[in-house]
Amino acid sequence: MSFTSQQILQALATVQEPDLKQDLVSLNMIENIEIQGKEVSFTVILTTPACPLKELIKNNCTKAIHDLVSKDLNVTVNMRANVTSSRSSLPILPQVKNIIAVASGKGGVGKSTVSANLAIALQQSGAKVGIIDADIFGPSMPTMFNCETAQPGIVNVKGKNLIIPIERYGIKLLSIGFLSPPEEAVVWRGPMASSALRQFIADTEWGELDYLIIDLPPGTSDIHLTLVQTVALTGAIIVTTPQKVALADAQRGLAMFKQKNINVPILGVIENMAYFTPAELPENKYYIFGKDGGKVLAKRNQVNFLGEIPLIQSIRESGDYGAPVMMETENQTNLAFKNVAENVAQAVALQNAKEQKTQIVQMTS
């Protein structure tokens, strides 16, 4: 008995994309159907290479074909990603599909550590990723990526000089730390810091990126306002630790993005230092800063809880050594960051599925 591509498509039309709640065929996620005897293969186009539901989609496709076409078919489901974007077509960063701000109300919650490992986790999934270290007065990415002495190059494009980001571990990086001696303080007024951030965004040859992560300084400042008025953000991530003081500041940071005249989508909350696990007792969890603070913050604001990261010595050590923990062999910490990255990618894809495009913030006061 012979089978047709139409039969395969009809079967796959019963398979829903778990997040978008529409079938794969209607979403144009199926291509390259090939049938040779009892061998059937096709490709599913994912919205992100970090999709946490790959296996579920694959299994559902195989089951649908076996149930509705023939149990005797050998089904091969290939997958590739075409990262979606909700950014409007703009002259600034037109080749960057998603721009994600990583913020916190309070310093010392590990926001830069989360940004660095999130970027590497997304890159390891197959995405093209860049980071802007927007903490002008306390840059940490050069240390975390072991490139403190690196200096960005310059390229002339159509008569305009553009900065070439540093590349490390597959990530494109730009930080004020590359442009000033590490032992010297950057003593600038707000307008100077804002001008530097605009240069990092608009006067840099970023090329094609699936995700550009903006590691923001603590608090709510000129830098934050400059960012939202310069580019259309896909959304913001709030990083907090579980204790009450950090949560109060994180609430303020979250509220800034939700203000009516700013209105940047909140992709979710990440809880860092959620629990302490000693190396000699890897199964034990000690909630030394409190428990579930990030979950409570997310629930209160009706946003996603993107995951929790443990307080483990290797995370601190890897940042100090300039090789973020995601570069190590897979372990408990890697899996935590991988889970967070998958949830972030999922939140971005869902945000992009909405009809409304993200825009540059227009503020008159």
Image (cartoon, rainbow, N blue to C red):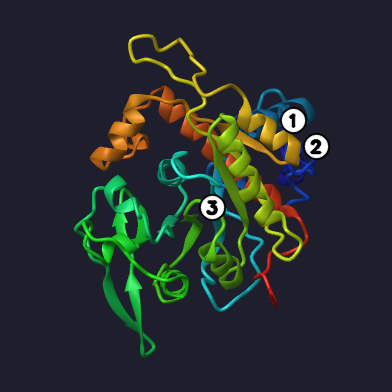
* In the image: residue 201, left or right of residue 2: left
Q: Earlier in the sequence, mark 2 or mark 1?
A: 2
- State the CA–CA distance, disc 3 to disc 2: 47 Å
Kindly tell me whether residue 173 is visible in this rendering.
yes
Kindly tell me whether residue 40 is visible in this rendering.
no
Label pair 3/2, CB-CB below 8 angstroms: no
Residue lying at 61% horizontally and 50% vertically, measured from the top left = 253
Given the current orientation, which residue lies at the most extreme bottom position? Answer: 159
Residue lying at 79% horizontally and 30% vertically, measured from the top left = 68
Label pair 2/1, CB-CB below 8 angstroms: yes
- Residue 162 vertical placement versus 287 (above, below): below
Residue 164 sits in which quadrant?
Answer: bottom left
Q: Secondary structure at mark 1?
A: helix
Across the whole image, how many numbered discs are drawn on residues?
3
Identify the residue under disc 1.
Answer: 64
Identify the residue under disc 2.
Answer: 14
Foreground label between 1 and 3: 3
- Residue 178 vertical placement versus 169 (above, below): below
Residue 78 sits in which quadrant?
Answer: top right
What's the amino acid at mark 1?
Ala
What's the amino acid at mark 2?
Thr
Residue 199: percent from left, percent from top? 42, 74
Q: Secondary structure at mark 3?
A: loop
- Disc 3 crowd, CA 10 A, few/some/many (<14, 14-19, 20+): some
Q: Identify the image quadrant of the N terminus.
A: top right
Q: Is 40 in front, or is 307?
A: 307
What's the amino acid at mark 3?
Gly
